[in-house]
Image: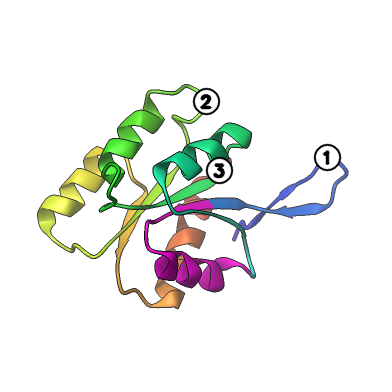
Amino acid sequence: MTETTEGKTGEKKKKVILALDDAPANLQIIQNTLKDEFDIRLAKSVQMAVTALSRSVPDLLLLDVAMPEMSGFEFVKMLRANPRWEGIPVLFVSSCASEDFAAQADFQGAKGYIVKPFNPESLRNLVRKVFDACPDA
């Protein structure tokens, strides 16, 4: 399983995950679930996420679908239009479990999605699976 990368001096560095969700409680759950294995960055708005992305490119983006400023799907379209961000793997987090949602997530190139409320171990396993499948992430 790949949760770290080699830093410049050879030390192990945690993979960076940027989580974007407008609900602070959801961000807290994500952080508490993943913080032991990964470096978690939190954004509660699209603007905060864009600012974080401008500073450094994460290894994975956990993205809520239903946000007030724009949908997660719209955010991914914006992400894919920027050459610096187009290759960031995305996992959608949503309270919607419909087939239409799954098809849209797949169409957007998501590496997967998880439905809220989720089991913390299921989220950890999904994130690990993405990193195992995308070792360069």
- Which of the image's four quarters has the C terminus? top right
- Residue at coordinates 44% horizontally, 54% vertically from top-left? 44
Q: CA distance from mark 2 to mark 1?
A: 21 Å
Q: Nearer the viewer, residue 62 or 51?
A: 51
Q: Is residue 87 left or right of residue 35?
A: left
Mark 2 packing: few (<14 Cα in 10 Å), some, or many (20+)?
Answer: few
- Disc 3 is placed on an element classified as loop
Which callout, 2 or 1, points at the residue further toward the start of the chain?
Answer: 1
- In depth, the one of 134 and 124 nearer the eye is 124
Q: How many residues crowd around disc 1 within 10 Å: few (fewer than 14), some, or many (20 or more)?
A: few
Find numbered disc 1 in the image and state the secondary structure of the residue it sits on. Answer: loop
Q: Is residue 124 visible?
A: no
Instruction: From the top left corner, tell me how far across and down residue 36 is, in percent.
Output: 64, 70
Residue to which mark 2 is pinned: 84
The picture quadrant where one finds residue 77 is: top left
Query: Where is mark 3, residue-wise?
Result: 137
Callout 2–callout 1 Cβ contact below 8 Å: no
Q: What secondary structure characterizes most of the magenta part?
A: helix
Q: Which contiguous range is marked in magenta?
A: 18-35
All told, the count of numbered labels is 3
Instruction: Write down the quadrant of residue 80 in the picture.
Output: top left
